[in-house]
Image (cartoon, helix red, strand yellow):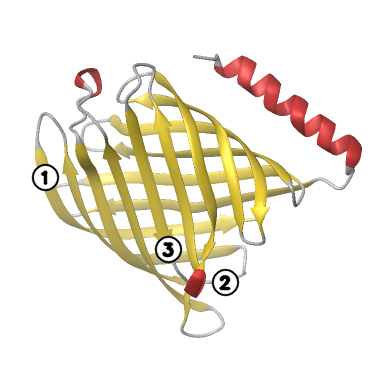
Amino acid sequence: MISLARLMLFLLTINVAVAQDDPMLFNHFKAERLEYEGNGKLHLFKWEVQNWVGNDEHKLWLKTEGDYSADQDIFGRADLQLLYSHNISTFWDFQIGARRAFEPERTFDGVIGFQGLAPYFIEVDSALFITDNGNFLSRLSLSRDLLLTQRLILQPRLEVNAAARDIQNRGIKAGITEFETGVRLRYELEREFAPYLGFDYVEEESLREHQHSLRFVLGVRVWY
């Protein structure tokens, strides 16, 4: 598999070429989730952060997502994606690149995905991860903002992770490995800064165990 350093160099070369044709480059950072999630038995800190640089047609994306268990002092899941993104229609981008997983195993995966806005203003972020032994993992995130007032916003959210086959060294079981759904109610003190609270229902399936729980969520959403 192509190393992450070579892929970064390739994608940066693409963006330099794009910049020569179109000098108007923009940057957008968004921490969609910086939050505490827990109940009486579980205490997690989660993040979901994205940053892109580019123009309307071509972008270089960095995405990272994961969680840290305060109880056990370990990371449950953590990864970083580097993606080249090309606009294929008014509201959709095609993305390709690589993912570096740091937890639970340190691995590299290829990534192919689509990100955009579906009908009824549903935000979609989807990815297919191709492992070094030819297995396939997938992740689909859906969310929608429902404006209660100009500042008070209710956001239903769904995320599903799945695997085509068992992966012994990662403890991954074929099928749906994680199902997470919930709502968050945020208040935009400024458009770029919004604390929120809510709840999540989470089911996790692995080769080692199956667990499900209802969790309280408290966090902040930041972008610029």
Name the element at disc 2: loop
Q: Of the residues tagged 2 and 3, which is closer to the observer?
A: 3
Give the residue type that dot 1 points to.
Answer: Gln
* Alpha carbon distance from label 1 to label 3: 24 Å
Give the camera-side residue of 151 and 77.
77
Q: Is residue 40 visible?
A: no
Considering only order in the chain, which callout, 3 or 2, is on the residue closer to the N terminus?
3
Q: Is residue 6 visible?
A: yes
Q: Of the residues tagged 1 and 3, which is closer to the observer?
A: 3
Read off the residue under disc 3. Answer: 143
Considering only order in the chain, which callout, 3 or 1, is on the residue closer to the N terminus?
3
Name the element at disc 3: strand
Read off the residue under disc 2. Answer: 189
Name the residue located 47 percent from the left edge and 57 percent from the top edge.
124
* Alpha carbon distance from label 2 to label 3: 21 Å
Q: Of the residues tagged 2 and 1, which is closer to the observer?
A: 1
Considering only order in the chain, which callout, 1 or 2, is on the residue closer to the N terminus?
2
Q: Quadrant of the C terminus?
A: bottom right
Read off the residue under disc 1. Answer: 211
